[in-house]
Amino acid sequence: MRNKLKNSKVQAIMVPIIAIIVSLLVGAVVLLCLGKNPISVYYNILQGAGILPKPSYAGYKGLITDFFSLLNMWTPMLFASLAVAVALKAGLFNIGVAGQMLTAGFVSTIVVGYSSLGDFIAKPLVILIGILTGALVGGLIGWLKHRYNINEVVSSIMINYIAQYVISFFITMYYINPVSRQSNPVSQAARLTLVDMKVGNYKMDIPLSIILAIILVFVVRFLLNRTKVGFELKAIGESKNAAKYAGMNVGKNMVLAMAISGALAGLAGVTYYLGYFGSIQPKVLPSIGFDSIAVALLGNSNPVGILFSSLLISIINKGSTYMSSAAGVEAEIASVITGIILLFSACSFYIRHKMDRLGSKSEEKKSETLTETKDKSSSIHKDGKQEEKKIESTETKEDNKWN
């Protein structure tokens, strides 16, 4: 068992699981210090997220409606986390996902969200505009990195601020809703979520893009693992100098990686602002854009791992409100638990180091055991030969005596 700990595939699965288990245990200690039962608090989180049933529900609500609400929240988180992962594979750190989400959401809102287009044109157009806008912003960051060697972290943070305040100005001046103090709500035809859709005895919010998000998980996995583009992106992420020596176009691939990352962030933006929400709050960047960085790290930048890590974080975030009312715990405790999980996920290199050490010790013990066994067998073999020689010499002496 210990020999398998050095296997990279085993580590890719075990490291996040260890981080989550340790984090939940630390979270349990925090809850015990507050005088709360950790098991009941975690149970309440699952109830609020629609994983487990609540004792009672309001009219037209039930476990199924809570679950679909979770899917609605999960969709942009999944897109955003994939965006971060693609950039990380190429050795780039896209901290501007929030700004790319906001820009894509705003452009889609004013172009399609306030138009009179029908459902069958508006919804695909929203997705297309989100992809193109996000790709342009992400590609710009990659181009600045390639052309002027401007660190992508610096340029993406600056673009975040530019997007935040420029878009806030336009919303406040031209699109503000006097009641909600947010942008005017988009048309139902442009919404990527079917709001209050009556299904049987329930009224639920059905996210239309969740299927696209899950499909893209496997598309991105195929792109990274089975295509020339993915191979070059990962090679550049490992060593730019080695990739350049091998004849790869490093600059083009950096721009391409950031463009793909931006396109996914754009999808996160439209599913957030024209799906989960129906409007944009001025002067606020979406927290999902920053949470997605830690989610991608927790999922080891693996698309399939991100599928589960993003779901876990979405469950905790979604269940926090009900947990607060049911358990009498501040809703911010859920953020504390999330933070602890992400903190331990950031310690993945340390956990890998420990697993490698355990695997190495196991191999050393195994080699020592084999050496001891060989030594014993060789000594037994030598003793046997000596005994044979003694017997032969004794027999020879007896023969000579009789002769």
Image (tube, rainbow, N blue to C red):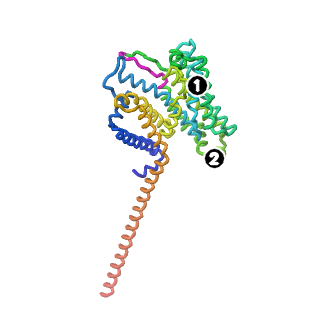
Which secondary structure lies at badge 1?
helix
User: In which image quadrant can residue 250 be found?
Assistant: top right
Residue 133 at x, y percent in the picture: 61, 25
Residue at the (64%, 39%) spot, across then down: 151
Quarter of the picture containing the C terminus is: bottom left
User: Amino acid type of disc 1?
Assistant: Ala
Q: Is residue 335 above or below residue 368?
A: above
Residue that mark 1 sits on? 104
Residue at the (48%, 22%) spot, across then down: 208
Which secondary structure lies at badge 2?
helix
Residue 189 at x, y percent in the picture: 52, 15
In this image, 127 relative to 38: left or right? Answer: right
Marked residue nearer the N-terminal end (2 or 1): 1
User: In which image quadrant can residue 379 be found?
Assistant: bottom left
The residue sitting at the right extreme is 148
Residue at the (57%, 15%) spot, across then down: 114
In this image, 139 relative to 349: left or right? Answer: right
Q: Residues within 10 Å of mark 2 (few under 14, many from 20)?
A: few
User: Amino acid type of disc 2?
Assistant: Ala
Q: Could you give the CA–CA distance between mark 2 and mark 1, rounded to whole angstroms?
A: 35 Å
User: In which image quadrant can residue 22 be found?
Assistant: top left
Q: Is residue 331 above or below residue 346?
A: above
Magenta residues, start to end: 200-210
Q: Is residue 212 above or below residue 34?
A: above
The answer to if 101 sits in the magenta stretch is: no
Q: Residues within 10 Å of mark 1 (few under 14, many from 20)?
A: many
Residue 385 at x, y percent in the picture: 37, 74
Q: Nearer the viewer, residue 262 or 212?
A: 262
Residue 103 at x, y percent in the picture: 59, 26
Residue at the (37%, 23%) spot, across then down: 64
In the picture, the disc for residue 242 is 2
